[in-house]
Amino acid sequence: MTITKIIEFDMGHRIPNHKSQCRNLHGHRYKLELNIEGEVQKEVGRSEEGMVFDFIDVKTLLMNEVHSKCDHAFMFYEKDPVLAVFAKKNKSLKFVSVPFIPTAENISDWIFNILSKKIEIISKKKFHLQGIKLWETPTSSAFISKKN
Ligand SMILES: [Zn+2]
């Protein structure tokens, strides 16, 4: 069984070497879809009976690990010559410095790794992160699934 949870967050970024508009400072309303796969829990009388993983707990995980870090933040590549200097001079603003160019593909990979490690710890092997899809615009997304 696969369950899906969606959150959204507003975040700025830029693609430093982009041939066109994406090199400018701009932002997106990102939409993150998370898929968790596992057995439906059958233990009678437990809060999670009939569930793979409680949607409330999925939401808490996503809010703590992604939303709180990224919402109303500006994500930049740590070697971006413009943003690295700007962020250093403006420490009161919310930045996320990352060791990669913040494309939808790379952000997806980053989020997938953070969440898969967290889920592995809390799932006790009852479920796992199957995949995530990160929407950068209503028509553009990156999808990454479990690496075996
Ligand atoms: Zn963009």
Image: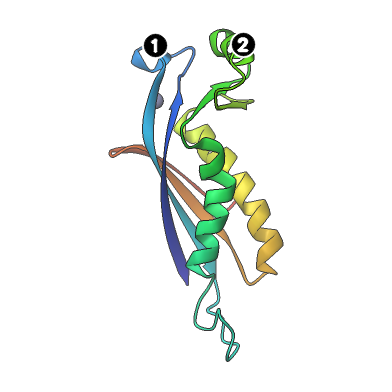
Spot occupied by residue 142 in the image (x, y as percentages of width and height): 43, 40
| Rendered view: 61 above or below 47 | above
Q: Which amino acid does label 1 sit on?
A: Lys
Task: Tell me which residue sits at (49%, 13%) in the image.
Answer: 16
Q: In this view, does 128 lie to the left or right of 138?
A: right
Query: For the point 43% across and 58% down, which residue is it?
Result: 5
Circle 2 residues within 10 Å: few <14, some 14–19, many ≥20? few
Task: Confirm whether residue 34 shows in the render.
Answer: yes
Crowding at label 1, few (<14), some or many (≥20) Cα neighbours within 10 Å? few
The reply to whether the residue tagged 1 has its Cβ within 8 angstroms of ligand 1 is no
Which numbered disc, 2 or 1, marks the residue that appears first in the sequence?
Answer: 1
Q: Is mark 1 on a helix, strand or loop?
A: loop
Quadrant in which the C terminus is drawn: bottom right
Report the amino acid beneath label 2.
Answer: Lys
Q: What element carries label 2?
A: helix
Between 42 and 85, the residue placed more toward the observer is 85
Query: At 45% across and 19% down in the image, what residue appears?
Result: 14
Where ligand 1 lies, by quadrant?
top left
Quadrant hosting residue 123: bottom right
Q: Name the residue under label 2.
A: 89
Residue 74 location, x and y as percent? 50, 25
* 136 lies above or below 93: below
Q: How far apart are marks 2 and 1 (CA)?
A: 27 Å
Q: Residue lying furthest front in this view?
A: 92
Tell me the tag on residue 19. 1
Q: Find residue 61 and name its label.
A: none
Residue 118 image-quadrant placement = bottom right
Residue 23: image x %, image y %? 42, 13
Give the answer, above or below, for where 33 lies relative to 91.
Answer: below
